[in-house]
Image (cartoon, rainbow, N blue to C red):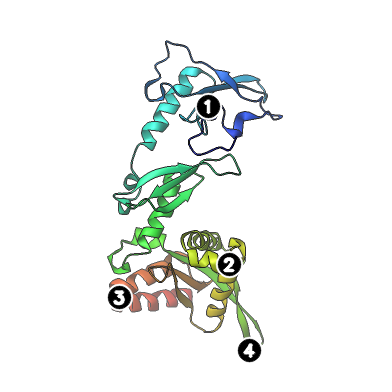
Amino acid sequence: MIETPLTLRRHPLVVSTGSPFASAAEDYTPPERLNAGAIKGHPWGRRICRVRPVAEQFMVYDAMGRNVLSTAPTPELAAHLACRRIARESLPPSTFRPVLEGCRFASRAPDSGSILVHQVLDEDGEVLGESEFGREDASKAAATMRLAEMERKLLTFEEFELITVPVAISRESLGRKTYGAVFAAGEGGRHQLRALMLAIWKADPEARALQPNHQKFIAQREIDLLQAAGSGNASVCDVDVSFCGGTRSIKVLLHEDRMGARTVMAMAFYQFRDPDEARIQSQRNLRQVG
């Protein structure tokens, strides 16, 4: 049978088969006295956890049996945790990010894999952002896409941080000659940079058409950024990365590793709010790191 998003599954894939750590899930009917509340009518499962001490695990699924809402050693606790999760997930995306006012949550079950993907849809039903790590993370991804459409002068510093990523670089040289820029060793900002590039690839049909392989797309964008940073001698290379036909953009700040990421971010933000203050602050920071 070909499954559709509305196909009822008795047990989610993640618990439908056994492993060295737990048995395969089996059907379970909770006691009638249990106060089910918001999960009344939801399918349940039970399995044996083989990690010592061996114990039963009671699981509450979503209404379609595709996702485990909660797992606990007793039906009462499993029901309580599932109800709390449903209450938390009934909150709109704007609860997590005010800029998402008018948006709503959805989810999809990927054809391959067993983890439910949480989505944020805009007013027109288009996907703004998604994540396998929960609704709060999906809201962050969606807020990034929404803020990328806005005039940066209207953003708060916290919002500005979502669409701006500072990444430390170093310049390779031999004697007096500089050959180019490379990411600094152990640079944590590169993970955020790659995550943003993946979000761009997912959001922009033109990017996917240009390069169907997202890993190759990200690698090429990193090369482009390093070439831009290596072509000049500025301590900070400020690059606006536009996508979706120029209607959205994020900012990448490639900075010398002697400068702190937080300082670089503040300098870029003040540049929009008060250019004179930004210049003074920049001179102070350069004296401190010089």
Do labels 2 and 3 touch, CB within 8 Å? no
Do labels 1 and 4 touch, CB within 8 Å? no
Front: mark 1 or 4 = 1
Q: Earlier in the sequence, mark 2 or mark 3?
A: 2
Query: Badge 4 is on which residue?
Result: 176
Across and down, in percent, residue 280 comes to 33, 78
Query: Badge 2 is on which residue?
Result: 211
Q: Earlier in the sequence, mark 1 or mark 4?
A: 1
Q: Earlier in the sequence, mark 4 or mark 2?
A: 4
Across and down, in percent, residue 77 comes to 47, 21
Q: Nearer the viewer, residue 7 or 189?
A: 7
Do labels 2 and 1 touch, CB within 8 Å? no
Front: mark 3 or 1 = 1
Across and down, in percent, residue 157 comes to 34, 62
Q: Nearer the viewer, residue 189 or 122?
A: 122
Check disc 4 and give the amino acid type: Arg
**Label 2, label 1: how far apart the Cα atoms are:** 41 Å
